[in-house]
Image: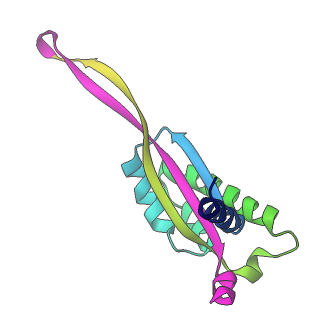
Amino acid sequence: MGLRKHLRAEKLKEEKKNQYVAKLSNCPTSPRKMRLVADLIRGQEVNKALAILRYTKKEAAQRLEKLLLSAIANWQNKNEGKRIEDNNLYVKEIYVDSARMLKRLRPAPQGRAHRIRKRSNHVTLFVDSKNTIETNE
């Protein structure tokens, strides 16, 4: 590996140490339905986002609530001894990508068949502290 590539890899590795991520893969909900709920919590503080998800009636809200709790746990593992309330955690980034699609056939009139696409998605959620942003600038 060349020197430039090596330095870039080291820099990326250092940046990953300061990222707090949780991923949900192959969730059996369509990405469109999941994005409706993800848009509700994007940029919100963690406690407010948890409250929003707890009282949202959509099925996707339960899955995102569990994912957000996982991201908070990942933050706590990397920052032992720090309190969440003091660091003003918020949902920095959340995005929903399409995952595999199960293709099924449904009988149609006159011997035909219609294709049914059962969609699924991947969700990636980044949590960050507002205090770290102020100290970096």
**Stretch of the chain drawn in magenta:** 109-137
Q: Quadrant of residue 50?
A: bottom right
Question: Residue at position x 69%, y 82% from top?
Answer: 132
Question: Residue at position x 57%, y 49% from top?
Answer: 63
Question: Residue at position x 66%, y 86% from top?
Answer: 136
**Nearer-the-camera pick, 94 or 60:** 94
**Nearer-the-camera pick, 6 or 77:** 6
Image coordinates of residue 100 in percent, x first then y, are 43, 35
Residue furthest to the front: 2
Residue furthest to the right: 81
Question: In the visual, does 57 lie left or right of 111?
Answer: right
Instruction: Check if residue 34 falls in the magenta segment.
Output: no
In the image, residue 128 above or below residue 72: below
Q: Name the image colouring.
A: rainbow
Instruction: Give the number of callouts.
Output: 0
In the image, residue 20 above or below residue 110: below
In the image, residue 28 above or below residue 79: above
Question: Residue at position x 75%, y 79% from top?
Answer: 85
Question: In the visual, does 46 lie left or right of 81?
Answer: left
Image coordinates of residue 114 in percent, x first then y, are 22, 22
Instruction: Check if residue 127 falls in the magenta segment.
Output: yes
In the image, residue 58 above or below residue 93: above
Q: Quadrant of the C terminus?
A: bottom right
Q: Is residue 19 visible?
A: no
Image coordinates of residue 58 in percent, x first then y, are 47, 52
Q: Quadrant of residue 130?
A: bottom right
Question: In the visual, does 82 lie left or right of 12?
Answer: right
Residue furthest to the top: 111
Image coordinates of residue 103 in percent, x first then y, are 35, 25
Question: In the visual, does 117 lie left or right of 79?
Answer: left
Q: Is residue 69 visible?
A: yes
